[in-house]
Image (cartoon, helix red, strand yellow):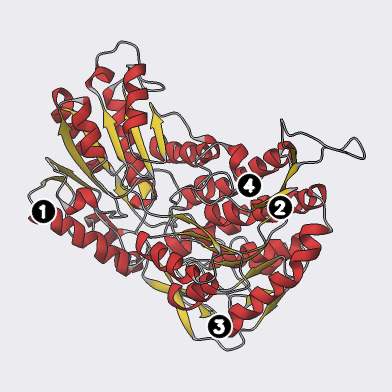
Amino acid sequence: MMRTPLGPRLAMASLALRFLPMIVLIVTSHPSESAASAGDNASCDSGSNDGGVECSPNDTPRRSLHLPHVSHFYIDGEFVDPLSPLAEIDVVDPSTALPVATVPLASRADVDAAVSAARRALPSWSLETTPTDRRRRVERLLEIYERREEDMARLISAEMGAPIDMARDGQVGAGSYHMEAFLEVLDEFEFERVLPNVYQEDSEDDEPATKILMDPVGVVSMITPWNLPLNQIVLKVVPALLVGCTCILKPSELSPLSALLFAELMDEAGFPPGVFNLINGDGEGAGTALASHPDVDMVSFTGSTRAGALVSSAAANTFKRVTLELGGKGAAVIFADVAEGEGGAGEYDSLEEIVQDVVWSVLSNSGQSCNAPTRMLVERSEYENAVKIAAEVASTARVGSAHEEGHDHIGPVVSEVQYDRVQSYIKAGIEEGARLVVGGLGKPDEVEGIGNGNEAGGYYVRPTIFADCHSEMSVMKEEIFGPVLCVVPFDTENDAIRITNGTPYGLTNYVYSSDGPRRRRMARALRSGMVEMNGAGRGSLSKWLRAAKVFRHTP
């Protein structure tokens, strides 16, 4: 009998849904209602008290959220004090640059406690529960999650700067969508598979002598990013639990609040002690300890390429399974035939619609999405037209507080470090000779007048378009993670392939053409894990894309 480890899919559900629970088959390169909330119409104060988390100030009073366990970890079915915290770190609202909470960073002792709890819980969770048992727990989690969606959205908006309506529709909405998708996959998943065409000798019953058993991989440490916090938490935690793994979640230290609320939901859903554990910490401390821990069977990491290399190195000595989803530098390749009005281009009727969609794909989430098409390649005959359209879109894109209602603006980037990083790339693009069409250095003028004045200190970036770029520019080769789009012309199909593949990243690319055979040739030639053609959705990621389109097109 052959056994194959089973565990959570890393990556943003970007391949076919039915493969999501199976790390063995596909790997890509990347308690109660009152416990967390005060009155519905409470106004926000500038500070926090009693361990609570206050939304940042704004002219409009809005719900004040409190997390009673903001200074705790969730280990072995209980919210516990840190054993020996290394330090504390402020959680800063990107819209105001003001702290909204303080969380402890885990020490090695805290990591050991969480791993030990997960290890103790593994035998009973993996062997004494059935898929139906685990399904019921996740169904209960989904019920609670949907009831607390507004609380979750406000925490995400406060901790990482997603505009509140995007946080509701895209960030939080993706979590419930993925849970539903995993439950559908579980119903069809075969945990025992007969190995075909194998000679059966002296079989004592009617059971095939040779099977493949899909077993849980074991204890999984999960390190998630800040840009899509709940999306990534659900994509790791839920499939792992459904197939019988136990886990330790370490969210980004920039976005720990939504993860703490998720731990409350897990507790209310009644998962057995030790099945799910949460610690907060940074990459150098808790992240390294989780990746190198001898009692962890697998580490699932989503984040930067540099950090991914460190995770792989830390895990090497214990020979654990490692899955990584790292950065991206996607290209949208637009052929001139989409402007000819013949044959169509999927859901698009014109070049203008395509360029608008590409630009908003970059601006959405303030450019902080690894799958954003931050390079736009346009066939030369339509190049200047496309640059003009892109400039019009970016110049009219409004920048505002993440706490402001509506779909008509983008928010800040996540932190001062990220703001400085984006500014350095904009400066480099100008110095390297790219044509600055829209945007540039500094903060947008409009942020000075929003809210009660605190927002002016937030980490706002001008939507920026560079044209006449070439492959040797740093803005063309490196991941910026901000609302910056580089536009470049190409002459031939081979030219487009060469430019698109001229980066070390390989997450997602996009092709727009009315020529079906050309699209398929491009998809085969482009070196990326995903190629989207004419706006077609990619499995369960479609929820995020649909939410982004609501944001992009609703006035």
Choose top left, top right, bottom left or bottom right for residue 230: bottom right
What type is the residue that disc 4 sits on? Pro
Counting residues from the start of the chain, the first of labels 3 and 1 encountered is 3
- Residue 21, numbered circle: 4
Counting residues from the start of the chain, the first of labels 4 and 2 encountered is 4
- Residue 108, numbered circle: 3
The span from disc 3 to disc 2 (Cα, nearest Å) is 29 Å
Place of residue 400 in the rendered image (x, y in percent of width and height, measured from the top left) = 34, 54
Residue drawn at x 53%, y 62% as measured from the top left: 155
Would you call the spot at circle 1 few (<14 residues within 10 Å), some (14-19), or many (20 or more)?
some
- Residue 430, numbered circle: 1
Residue drawn at x 59%, y 61% as measured from the top left: 41
The label nearer to you, 4 versus 2, is 2
Counting residues from the start of the chain, the first of labels 3 and 2 encountered is 3
Counting residues from the start of the chain, the first of labels 2 and 1 encountered is 2
Would you call the spot at circle 2 few (<14 residues within 10 Å), some (14-19), or many (20 or more)?
some
Q: Mark 2 points at which residue?
A: 215
Q: Are marks 3 and 2 in contact (CB under 8 Å)?
A: no
Counting residues from the start of the chain, the first of labels 3 and 4 encountered is 4
Q: Do the residues labelled 2 and 1 touch (CB within 8 Å)?
A: no
Q: Do the residues labelled 4 and 1 touch (CB within 8 Å)?
A: no
What type is the residue that disc 2 sits on? Asp
218 lies left or right of 386: right
Above or below for 297 versus 288: above
Q: State the SS at label 1.
A: helix
Place of residue 389 in the rendered image (x, y in percent of width and height, measured from the top left) = 21, 32
Q: State the SS at label 4.
A: loop
Residue drawn at x 47%, y 56% as measured from the top left: 324
Place of residue 59 in the rendered image (x, y in percent of width and height, measured from the top left) = 42, 61
